[in-house]
Image (cartoon, rainbow, N blue to C red):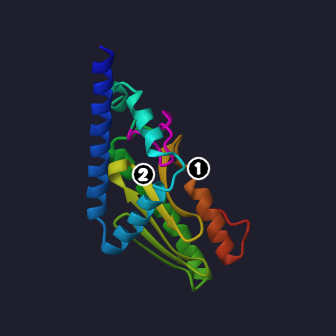
Amino acid sequence: MQRQASAASKSACNAAAKQSQSIRSFALASLPQQQQQQQQQLSRSSLTSPISRTQTANFCFQKSPAFFFSKGRYSVSTTDGRPIPTEIDELSIRDYHSVADEFLEDIVEQLESVSEKHAAVDVDYADGVLNLELPPLGDYVINKQPPNKQIWLSSPISGPNRYDLVKGKWTSLRDGSELKEVLEAEVGEAIGDAEFKFD
C-alpha cells in the first residue's frame, strides 16, 4: 500500500512538472524574440536557487497526488523551492486580465508623466508588455504572463522576478517584494527623487 502511494505521488509530481514545462514553453513561444531572450534569462535565474534538485524531489514525493491539483495552487513550488502560499488570490482568467491590465495601465500613465519631465525616460506599452528606458539604470520589461496569472519583471537593478496577486498586491513569492514598491524605488533612483511614489 505504501509503495502504491509513493508511486502515485511520484507520478503526480512528474505530471505536474511536465505540465509546468509545457506552460512555460507555450508562454515563451508567444513572445517576440527579444522578450523570449529576457524570459529565458529569468528561467535561468531560478536554477541558481540554493534548493537542490534532490530537496525539490523529496518535497514532491512526500505529497499526495491530491496536493498537486488542490484548489488555489497554480504550480508545485516557488522559484526557490518553497510551496506556494495558499493566500494567492484566486482569479478567473478574465479577472486576471482585468486586474493586470488596470495595474499596468496605471503604471504606464504615471511613467508617461515622468517622461514628460525627464526627456531621457521612454515608455512603450502594447499587448500587455511594458518597455521602459530608464537612464542611467537601463532598460526594463514588465509583462503579463496569463498562463501563470503573473506579472513578470526584468530589471537591470534588481534582476528578473515574478509577481503573483496576493491580497490584492502583485507580490514576489521568491523574496516577498511588491512590484509597485520595487518600481517606485528604482524609478526614484533614476530620476533623483528618493520620495517618488505612484499614486
Classify mark 2: helix, strand or loop.
strand
Compare residues 132 and 136 and report the one nearer the observer: 136
The label shown at residue 66 is none
Q: Quadrant of the C terminus?
A: bottom right
Asked whether, in this view, residue 90 is left or right of residue 167, the answer is left
Q: Residue at x 36, y 52 (%)?
A: 97
| Image mark count | 2
Q: Residue at x 73, y 65 (%)?
A: 195
Residue 111 belongs to the span the image colors magenta: no
Q: Residue at x 41, y 38 (%)?
A: 57
Residue 136 can be seen, yes or no: yes
Residue 178 x %, y %: 58, 52
Q: Earlier in the sequence, mark 2 or mark 1?
A: 2
Check disc 2 and give the amino acid type.
Gln
The residue range painted magenta reads 74-87
Classify mark 1: helix, strand or loop.
loop
Compare residues 159 and 52 and report the one nearer the observer: 52
User: Which residue in the structure is indicated by mark 2?
Assistant: 150
Q: Quadrant of the N terminus?
A: top left
User: Which residue in the structure is indicated by mark 1?
Assistant: 175
Q: Residues within 10 Å of mark 1 (few under 14, many from 20)?
A: few
Compare residues 175 and 60 and report the one nearer the observer: 60
Compared with residue 180, is residue 171 higher up or lower down, i.e. above or below?
Answer: above
Asked whether, in this view, residue 87 is left or right of residue 2, the answer is right
Asked whether, in this view, residue 17 is left or right of residue 188, the answer is left
- Kindly report the secondary structure that dominates the magenta region of the rendered protein: loop
Residue 85 belongs to the span the image colors magenta: yes
